[in-house]
Image (cartoon, rainbow, N blue to C red):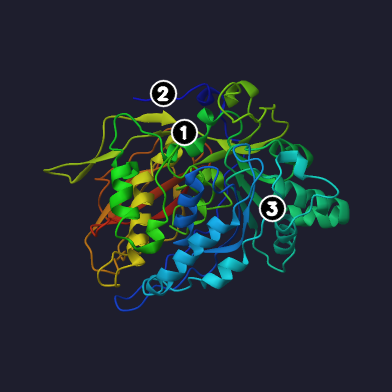
């Protein structure tokens, strides 16, 4: 059993849960490529690519989801790990490799943009570090582009995914504050959603202090206290094979076309930047506007963390760790019990070992997100019939329901199907950290059936419960999709 650090004692939930609609999953026929999602998230990337191979790794993965996320800018930047250079040429080289496999990707799902369009979105920031790049004469192609994209007539929020230092974003915000009215600035800030991989220059704290209303997801402080490290952390007591160098070589790098070949070897850690956009993938689990609901990129709660909980003496590359002055979306803690396969009887059972940790909010999904990436790498080189595609999860009831205290009800995913005709496995569970009751509500039948039986708890006031169904096919690699059911229990 793993125990969390001091963060476990300090984390708490601030926002009440509300009901929202979950992103629909669309069906696909065996003979046709799947359609793109009806409404995609907008994404603009800042990356200190070449400071560490993990930025290139993350960019290779992102391009395989370029039909499910609207990439609206890719800005090479500096960071504390690379203070005096930016590397647009590396991004352009990887996009060239994407161009070589795009036609094959389109056989599997529609909507992959042309490489020329992606090349046009590479806009460089200044080759200076941190706050030295923020001020009256510090505009750049990158900061100007952020403003242009933000000002577009588009009601969707703009997610800024920061894999290095955020000083190009800081300069864009500085320029907006200088040139816009208070009302105009407020309207533009309301459209921004920022996720930074820790604080990789000294402009990050400046942004949060000067724009306190900005939606900001980050694990500030020492990297040892960061949720994003869960993507590559080796966890005692589980199978870590899908993050091994051997797995990456066999499933991503070698014999998977020119784009897979652009995925470099791990130097310091695998894909430390990928969590900054994983929750934008429409997999039926993540709700980007609700970081506290959890997803492939981890789970985050809105509060002002204490300085001592930020690992202030830990490694930051030299970026000072400052006390937070306002609430941010930051580390949350899950208690996670992995399921296990059984040779006889019930095919899947709850395991005996559990883990309580902020990193568990991410690594609990790690095998599923790794297999999803491996399948998309296959799409670049294989025909539709020779590759695997994710199941389509269909509920036989609403995604929101109201149940009387103590009554019985069913959760039902009959109608779920697989585009390749693969056999499917099911796993239903209550996600207690997301609901208003912190003790898990048990499934009263075998959790691995398509339709399960639950008894609502006895309550004295309305409570909300989040149930997740995880559906995995038996293709190679196995692929998983989800549905979330929000149950309101009334007295």
Callout 1: helix, strand or loop?
Answer: loop
Marks 1/2: CA distance? 18 Å
Residue 115 visible in rendering: yes
Which residue position holds label 2?
3
434 shown above or below 419:
above
Circle 2: is it few (<14), some (14-19), or many (20+) Cα within 10 Å?
A: few
* Residue 100 placement: quadrant: bottom left
Callout 2: helix, strand or loop?
Answer: loop
**Percent position (x, y) of residue 182?**
87, 52
Q: Is residue 162 left or right of residue 372?
A: right
Q: Quadrant of the N terminus?
A: top left
Q: Earlier in the sequence, mark 3 or mark 1?
A: 3
Q: Residue at x 50, y 55 (%)?
A: 59
284 shown above or below 332:
below
58 shown above or below 381:
above
Q: Residue at x 57, y 58 (%)?
A: 89
Q: Earlier in the sequence, mark 2 or mark 3?
A: 2
Residue 125's disc number: 3
**Percent position (x, y) of residue 143?**
73, 55
Marks 3/1: CA distance? 45 Å
Callout 3: helix, strand or loop?
Answer: loop
Q: Is residue 366 left or right of residue 10?
A: left
**Percent position (x, y) of residue 278?**
49, 51
Marks 2/3: CA distance? 41 Å
**Closer to viewer: mark 1 or mark 2:** 2
Which residue position holds label 1?
438
* Foreground residue among 42 and 303: 42
């Amino acid at each position: 059993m793993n125990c969390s650090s001091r963060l476990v004692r300090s984390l708490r939930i601030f926002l009440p849960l509300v009901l929202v609609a979950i992103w629909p999953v669309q069906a696909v026929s065996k003979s046709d490529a799947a359609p793109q999602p009806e409404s995609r998230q907008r994404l603009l990337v800042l990356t200190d690519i070449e400071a560490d191979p993990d930025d290139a790794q993350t960019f290779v993965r992102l391009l395989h989801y370029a039909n499910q996320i609207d990439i609206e800018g890719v800005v090479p930047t500096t960071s504390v790990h690379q203070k005096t250079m930016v590397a647009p040429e590396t991004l352009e080289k990887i996009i060239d490799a994407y161009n070589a496999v795009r036609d094959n990707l389109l056989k599997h799902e529609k909507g992959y943009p042309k490489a020329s369009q992606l090349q046009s979105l590479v806009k460089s920031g200044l080759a200076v570090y941190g706050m030295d790049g923020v001020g009256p004469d510090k505009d750049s192609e990158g900061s100007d582009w952020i403003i242009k994209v933000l000002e577009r007539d588009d009601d969707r929020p703009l997610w800024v995914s920061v894999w290095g230092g955020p000083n190009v974003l800081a300069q864009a915000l500085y320029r907006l504050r200088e040139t816009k009215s208070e009302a105009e600035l407020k309207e533009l800030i309301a459209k921004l959603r920022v996720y930074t991989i820790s604080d990789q220059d000294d402009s990050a704290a400046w942004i949060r202090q000067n724009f306190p209303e900005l939606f900001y997801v980050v694990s500030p402080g020492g990297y040892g206290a960061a949720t994003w490290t869960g993507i590559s952390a080796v966890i005692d007591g589980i199978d870590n094979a899908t993050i091994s160098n051997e797995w990456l070589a066999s499933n991503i790098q070698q014999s998977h076309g020119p784009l897979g070949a652009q995925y470099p070897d791990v130097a310091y850690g695998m894909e430390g930047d990928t969590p900054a956009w994983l929750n934008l993938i429409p997999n039926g689990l993540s709700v980007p506007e609700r970081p506290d609901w959890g997803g492939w990129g981890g789970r985050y709660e809105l509060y002002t963390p204490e300085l001592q909980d930020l690992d202030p003496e830990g490694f930051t590359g030299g970026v000072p760790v400052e006390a937070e002055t306002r609430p941010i979306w930051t580390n949350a803690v899950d208690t996670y019990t992995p399921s296990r396969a059984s040779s006889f009887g019930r095919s899947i059972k709850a395991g005996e070992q559990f883990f309580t940790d902020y990193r568990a909010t991410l690594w609990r999904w790690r095998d599923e997100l790794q297999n999803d990436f491996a399948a998309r790498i296959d799409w670049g080189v294989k025909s539709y019939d020779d590759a695997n595609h994710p199941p389509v999860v269909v509920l036989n009831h609403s995604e929101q329901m109201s149940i009387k205290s103590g009554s019985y009800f069913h959760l039902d995913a009959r109608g779920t199907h697989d585009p390749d005709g693969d056999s499917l496995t099911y796993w239903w569970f209550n996600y207690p950290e997301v609901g208003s009751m912190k003790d898990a509500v048990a499934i009263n039948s075998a959790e691995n059936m398509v339709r399960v039986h639950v008894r609502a708890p006895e309550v004295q006031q309305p409570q909300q419960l989040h149930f997740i169904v995880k559906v995995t096919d038996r293709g190679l690699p196995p692929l998983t999709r989800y549905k979330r059911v929000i149950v309101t229990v009334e007295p």
